[in-house]
């Protein structure tokens, strides 16, 4: 079983629509969770950290479910510029900001 | 602006050549840097953790004699792919851990696309 698993997609989303997708992680001791965005042939860029109570950053909402070991990302009012691969990232215990484990990414394609 | 610089961005070379990739932290000191490799449509895989002033820690399955890491200063780590072969062609990305005033665990370089012919 992969340590961080994501639906690869692609999720084809009309502009203005909402899209949501999950990620599951295997290590119950992980404490830090992030969503990164990666554009084609580019480095990953931090989109947002994911907090226990869930958090929102503009059109992006992240949730964490520790019991079921998954995190989610919801994008509202999708823009064409949201087209990218979204990487779920989890820390490798015990260091909460040390080594990271990356999912393979969920591809989102926003269409006009 | 970028806080981690990686160089070169793109390398194409013949099989058997050794290739050196540099990773620099631009405005902070990084005692720890990380080297990743990413194949198309796959996740970033951690290759090794580079520690300033000491030997790198390699992940299981990564050949330390093949991928030489040197972290001689607080702002520079280098990865040398020795005697590269076509199967080493990949996207190599470094990151640096910033201990002061950072809102994220690691800052990533732009990546190096390595193509071995």
Image (cartoon, coloured by chain):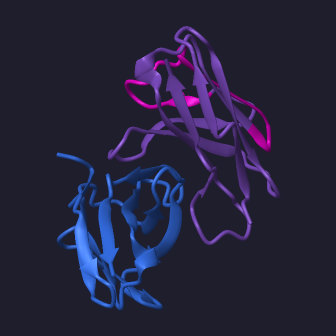
Chain colours: A blue, B purple
Residue range (magenta)? B56-76
Position above or below: A77 against A12: below
Q: Nearer the viewer, residue B29 or A23?
A: A23
Q: Is residue A65 visible?
A: yes
Residue B67 among magenta residues: yes
All told, the count of numbered labels is: 0
Query: What is the residue that sits farthest to the front in this orientation?
Result: A112
Quarter of the view holding residue A103: bottom left
Quarter of the view holding residue A20: bottom left
Position above or below: A79 against B78: below
Tell me the residue at 31%/77% (across/down): A111
> Quadrant where the N terminus of chain B lies?
bottom right
Tell me the residue at 80%/56% (across/down): B28
Residue B92 among magenta residues: no
Q: Is residue A92 visible?
A: no
Q: Position of residue B36 (x, y in %)?
A: 50, 40
Q: Position of residue A83 (x, y in %)?
A: 39, 70
Q: Position of residue A61 (x, y in %)?
A: 37, 86
Q: Position of residue A16 (x, y in %)?
A: 33, 91
């Amino acid at each position: 079983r992969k340590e961080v698993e994501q639906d690869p997609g692609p999720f084809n989303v009309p502009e203005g629509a909402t899209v949501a997708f999950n990620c599951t992680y295997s290590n119950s001791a992980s404490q830090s969770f992030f969503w990164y965005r990666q554009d084609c042939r580019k480095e990953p860029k931090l989109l947002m950290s994911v907090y226990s109570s869930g958090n929102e950053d503009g059109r992006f909402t992240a949730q964490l479910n520790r019991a079921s070991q998954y995190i989610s990302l919801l994008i509202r009012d999708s823009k064409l510029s949201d087209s990218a691969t979204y990487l779920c990232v989890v820390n490798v215990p015990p260091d909460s900001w040390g080594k990271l484990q990356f999912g393979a990414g969920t591809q989102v394609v926003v269409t006009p | 602006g970028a806080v981690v610089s990686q160089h070169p961005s793109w390398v194409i070379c013949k099989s058997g050549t050794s290739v050196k990739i540099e990773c620099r932290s631009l405005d902070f000191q990084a005692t720890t840097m990380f080297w990743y490799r990413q194949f198309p449509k796959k996740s970033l895989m951690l290759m090794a953790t580079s520690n300033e002033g000491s030997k790198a820690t390699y992940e299981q399955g990564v050949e330390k004699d093949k991928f030489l890491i040197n972290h001689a200063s607080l702002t520079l780590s280098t990865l040398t792919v020795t005697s590269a072969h076509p199967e080493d062609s990949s996207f190599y990305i470094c990151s640096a851990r910033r201990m002061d005033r950072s809102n994220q665990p690691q800052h990533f370089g732009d990546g190096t696309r390595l193509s071995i012919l």
